Every structure is written in C-alpha cells, then in structure tokens.
Image (cartoon, helix red, strand yellow):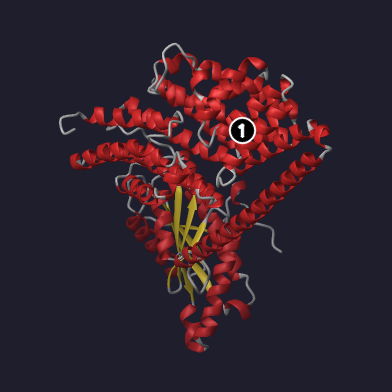
Amino acid sequence: MDERSDAWLVGRARELLAITQAGERTDLARHVDEMDRLLEQARRRDEPRLVGQLLRAATAIRVVDSRSALSAGDMVEEFLDHARCNKLLVLEADAHALRGTRLLMVGEEDDALSEVAVGLAMLDEKITPDPMFGSRVWHVLMTATLMDLGTVLAQLGVYEVADQVMKKANRHIRGGAGSHDISVHLLTRTRLQLGWGLRLERAGEDGEAALHFAEAAAMAGGIELPFRESLFRRMPGRSAADQLPVIGAAHALANPSGEHLERLHGLLELAPQREVIFVGIALARCLAHTGHLEEAVETLGDVQKRLHSTQSEQGLYLCLIREFARLSSLAGAADGGERTTSALQLYVAELEAQLSAQRLSRKTALDTRREHERLSRKHGTIARQALQDPLTGLPNRRALDERLEELSTQVGEKPLAIALVDLDGFKGVNDRMSHADGDDVLRVIASTVRDTLRGSDMVARYGGDEFIVLLPGAPLQPAAAALRRAADAVAGLPHDLSHGVTLSVGVVSLRPGETAARALSRADAAMYQAKRGGGNDVVAVPEDEPDTPESVREPATDPAWVLPEAT
C-alpha cells in the first residue's frame, strides 16, 4: 500500500463505501478493516485533505448499519475534529451530517436534528471552493455532504427540507461528479420520494402520494445508465432494478402488479434495514393486487418481526404497521375479524408511541432553544454593556472608535460630520452642589442632545463632560444647524434640570484620507473658539478653510435636519 498513490487510496475507499451503500452487509467487518488500513496509510502521509477524505469514508461506512454505528462515536469525533482544525468547512459540515446519522441509529432524533442544523448553517455561508482539492473533487465532496444532510432529514421525516437540500446537490453533480455519484444521488432521492409518499398515505393524501411514487419510479428508471458505470458491484446483464432493493420497490409502488413479484422476492432477502420496509410494502401490494391477501399479510408480518427492535426511521415503521392493518382488514372475514382487531390495536399502540416520542422530542427542542435564546440574550446584554457608558447610557469611547472606523471608510462616498461637545459651567455645578447633582445634569443633557438628532447619528460620551457626535451623510452646514438646535434645546431646559449648563460645540467634516485623530483635533480647536466667544455656541470649520472657524447661529432649512416637534 505504501506504493499506491493518494488517488488510489481515495478511489479504493469509495469502492468499499459503494459496496455497503448498495446493501451488502455480510462482509461489512472485513470492509471496515480494509478502510481502516487505508486511513492509517493516509495518516502516515500526513496530508490534511487526504486524511479528511479517508476519515469521511471510514465514518460513513460505519454508520450504514445500526450495530456498527454504536461503536462509531470515536471515529465520528476524530473526523469532526480533523475537519475543524484544518478548516475544511465542507468536510466539517459532512461530519455533522454523519454524526446525525449515527445519533439516529441509536434513537437520538432530537440531537440528530441539531447536528443537521449545524451542517446546513455552515453550507448557508458563502463558500469559496478549496483549490487544493481540485475542482472535480471539491464538487464531489459538496454533493456527498448535501446528500448526507438530506438523508438524515428524510429519515427524520422532514421530507420537504430534505428534498430542497438534495436538489442543491444537482449543481455540484454537474460540476464534476461521475457515474457513481450520479447513481448515489438518484438512489438517495428515490428513497426520499418513497418515504414521502408513504407518509402522505398515512395522512390520507393518496393522490399526492401517488405523484411521489411516480417521481420515484422516474428516478429509478434514470439510474439504469449511470449504474452500469458506477462503483457498485453489479451482475452483468441484470438491471439496477434487479439488484438495488429501493429501485425495484420504486417501480412496484408506482404500479403494483404481478410482474414485480419474482424480483421483489429476491430483493427482500438482499434489502438492508433502511430499505426492507419499502420492499416489504411493495411486495405485499403486488401480492394483494394478484389476490394473494394472506401471503401479503404474512410477508408484512415477517418484515415487522425483522424490524421490531429498530431504533431509526420510526415513521417508516409506522407505515409498515399501517399497511399490515389495512391488508389484514381486507382479509379479516376469513378469521372472524380477530386478526384485524389485533392489527389495528398494534397500529394504534405504535401511533400513540410515536406521537408521545414526538411530544417529548418537541419539549426537548423547546427547552434547548429556550436556553439558547436565554444565553444569546445574556451575551447580547453583556456585549452592549461593554460598549455603553454606565452613567448616561450613551455609547462609550470603545463604541465610538468602532463606529468612527467604520464610517471613515465611506467618506469618499458620503460626507461625515464630527462634532466635539463640551459643557459650559459644569465644573461649577460640581463645586457648588454635589457630584450626584452633576451626574443628574450629565444624564439630562445627554438625553436631550440624543433626542434632538436623527436615529442614525451617534452621540457618545468621550470622557468627563465631553461628548462626540457623529453625523453620517451630513454636509457641514446642515450638521452645524442640527447641533445648534441641540444647543438651543439644552439652553431651554428648566434651570432645576440643567442648573444653567450650556453647550460649546466644534464641528468639522472628515476629509478624505484624514485620520480620525486629526479631525477630532480640529473639532476640539473649533469647540474652544466657541467657548472663547462666551459659550452656548456652535463653530463649524469649513473643509477648505481649516484655520478659520465660522460661528453658526442660524439653522439651515435642509428638510433632513428639521428639529422634531417639541412634546
């Protein structure tokens, strides 16, 4: 094996996986052992993408069977950790899908749904193809990941979303998938349509169910050509419908008749746990169609015994019990109805058990999401507090710096006015009265300035009795007029609230290429000029005359800067 190429290792892993995907389980342990040897060889070569692909195959081959899935936990976690550490996003999403598959096998449906949600969220992001994989391999991996996610959703009975996810794989199949990938895609989507149809029958929607059976049969017909060139083990001269249980079942469920009986009898022996329900129901319907009701009921009874301990796909198991009850009722006249009553009681018991499990699952989901929301809100509160001045409730210096950095990158597209606001006479309030009274004045003035400006403007506490105002999109003169209205509003406050404190404001426009520190320095100089004039004033520094501040006393008439009506 040391002499084999990386491509050979990946190709052989795909072959082994294809054997198990086709339903052959008798040599599963031997195939798993060989897969592990391939993985160990990849580990020695220590190339992250190669190891990731082999880990994916070694995980997937273990979760095709409920018995091997029980011991697959460590492999799943190793795959997930490797993908995460090496930033292999597509493989990481697939690891969550395969973790979900394993959880389904052990009866943890709610946790499986959570894993799929994580994987889907990853693929909702804008993903750039990894050039180190090569275009074709990357599309193959995307196809496999989407199909793995869709498969778990289908097993959970979330058929509508599963169908959407699997359809997304079509683009990636066109991008580089070969005959085998196309075969797996059609096989998986056929299985989805059959499950969907059976669920609709349970709800009494026979017409809609028939449409899904017809679509499944069309996909089953479409698989014949790519199947001949796939990695699946094939018998020469035999169709895919003769060799793949779900494909044979699709043709029979779309059109039950005696012509399918011989094929279905053979497929029932080959069918893995996930597909024996499809084959069993298809065979029973074909038997019933030809008048062999007793044999149809016996067939379903045998399948039921074979699956009685299954942990996954309880919805499909319920479809089997329903079919058993339905056909038993047709044959019930022969035994006085005793078997019919027994079958219906079993159906009701299974239905109640599933509904109870669903309620428990929903309760668990509610608790989980509620706790998630609680933590999210708590995190949001902590984040807001980190950016908030505790005294005034305004944004603090850190929030100001972040917003200023963001807005400064847009200066070439739209203007940004920056104002520095200082309180006139505030020191006297602290000296004559108390710091508590001074704090009250700060809070009143902060809220007054905030209320007179637009919602998109930022008023931040800069330190002590200084504030910074950012007015995005505002030319200098309208910005100065808006700040004049704010100064007038503060000057008009009752004396017992403001204690005679007024505002001195310097405002400038940020120039293209100018640093925020330089702009604040200019605003600071303009503010001091307002103070030297006696305070309660707004001084604007035109862009083309930085050293000649201009006092602004008359408000502009720009409608975007009209003062809100007093209340």
Towards the viewer: 382 or 152: 152
Q: Amino acid at mark 1?
A: Gly
**Can you give x and y, in whole percent of width and height, for residue 479 in the image?**
51, 53
Q: Mark 1 sits on what residue?
A: 195
State whether residue 254 is above or below residue 196.
above
Q: Which residue corresponds to the image point at 60% horizontal and 47% vertical from the top-left?
A: 560
Relative to 336, is 130 on the left or the right? left
Relative to 121, is 91 on the left or the right? left
Quarter of the image that includes the N terminus: top left
Residue closest to the far left? 3
Q: Which residue corresponds to the image point at 53% horizontal and 25% vertical from the top-left?
A: 267
Residue 307 shows up from this direction: yes
**Can you give x and y, in whole percent of width and height, for residue 58 in the image?**
34, 40
State whether residue 1 is above or below residue 389.
above
Q: Which residue corresponds to the image point at 32% horizontal and 34% vertical from the top-left?
A: 130
Towards the viewer: 131 or 156: 156
Q: Which residue corresponds to the image point at 49% horizontal and 53% vertical from the top-left?
A: 471
Towards the viewer: 483 or 195: 195
**Can you give x and y, in whole percent of width and height, for residue 40 in the image?**
23, 42
- Quarter of the rendering containing residue 307: top right
Towards the viewer: 181 or 559: 181
Residue 534 shows up from this direction: no
Quarter of the image that includes the C terminus: bottom right
Q: Secondary structure at mark 1?
A: helix
Relative to 80, is 119 on the left or the right? right
State whether residue 294 is above or below residue 372.
above
**Can you give x and y, in whole percent of width and height, for residue 233 in the image?**
39, 22
